[in-house]
Amino acid sequence: MVRALTRLSTRSSKAQTSVEQIVPGVTVRVYRPARPTPDEPTRLPEQGRPALLWIHGGGLVFGVAAIDDPFCRQIADDLGIVVASVDYRLAPEHPYPTPLDDCYRGLRWLAEQPDVDPERIAVGGNSAGGGLAAALTLLARQRGEIRLVFQLLTYPMIDDRSSDRTDITPRQLRLWNQKSNRYAWTSYLGPAATDAAGQVSPLAAPARAEDLTNLPPAWIGVGTRDLFHDEDVTYVHRLRAAGVTCTLHEVPGAYHGFDVVEATAPVSREFRRAQIAALAVALTDPAPGNEENSVASPPASGSPSLSDEA
């Protein structure tokens, strides 16, 4: 039912985009700048644009790339870059590693486009898409074919062990709780996700990765009332300890997907501005300075409350 409703909700999308098939059953939605930005430098014909591979959310079991049409179109136009959003295959019909492999195919396709600079590609995603983006940086490091310059992770779903937490009050969570999380991870972690000792692969659940060195700089944003808050903050600290530049953007009182549900709230608009600003800096300078301090976005006066009392 959720899958059907998601598809219906995107039928009226008016975003300027093209759809390209990269392998049977897998497509990317491509957003190119509608017009050059006023301050965009003149490029020589052989120079490509920076690019972002975006990965949609949906708990690994639902969702379509078109759901993020407005966001991807805004990024393409505001930054003058090429954005490609992957319609990867979903669990449980297609468990790990199929969705991750689909995303890697999308990344290779993007890097091969004549109008893209393969040395200035970032990856990003929200929720399950953020988890796949984090895993994609691990896979890209392992294969050594594409050097990513940035990872934009919006409340990423990176740790299957959060499903078993008993120290969280259920009423603090909205839209996504331990029960939903357990179903999603159980659907995704098929036989290929575990080794002979029963250990889950870090390419399936990035929080399990022991080695986080030599990964691209990261921006991670999450609300304090999100099930993924603690796993995301822990990942930030581990990235920094491994020498990876990482910015943490915490939103007090915000629940999972708050910026989608309450898109017009000032705190949600500020959240999107922070994402786009971080991406702009990263694609202009692939090695920005380390930002150690968290950036908090308190709810603005008069905006909808993002606490559990709302």
Image (cartoon, rainbow, N blue to C red):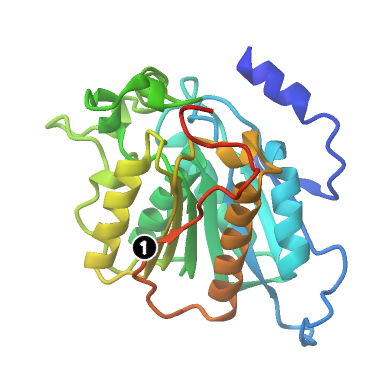
Determine the residue positioned at 48% across, 34% down: 307
Quarter of the image with the C terminus in it: top right
Query: In the image, is 141 to the left or to the right of 65?
Result: left
Q: Quadrant of residue 217?
A: bottom left
Q: Residues within 10 Å of mark 1 (few under 14, many from 20)?
A: some
Identity of the residue furthest to the front in this view? 301
Residue 80 in percent (x, y) is at 75, 70
Nearer to the camera, 180 or 47:
180
Q: Give the labeled residue for mark 1.
A: 141
The number of numbered badges drawn on the structure is: 1
- State the image coordinates of residue 128 (x, y, percent, origin top left): 47, 37
- Estimate the x, y position of residue 301 in percent, counting from the top left: 61, 48
Q: Quadrant of residue 64?
A: top right
Q: Is residue 49 above or below residue 209?
A: below
Please tell me which residue lies in front, 138 or 125. 125
In the figure, 265 relative to 3: above or below? below
User: Residue 229 placed where, x, y %?
Assistant: 36, 42
Q: Residue at x 75, y 47 (%)?
A: 70
Residue 114 visible to the viewer: no
Q: Residue furthest top?
A: 1
Residue lying at 46% horizontally and 20% vertically, measured from the top left: 92
User: Residue, x 41% and y 80% (percent of image)?
Assistant: 289
SS type, badge 1: helix
Amino acid type, mark 1: Arg
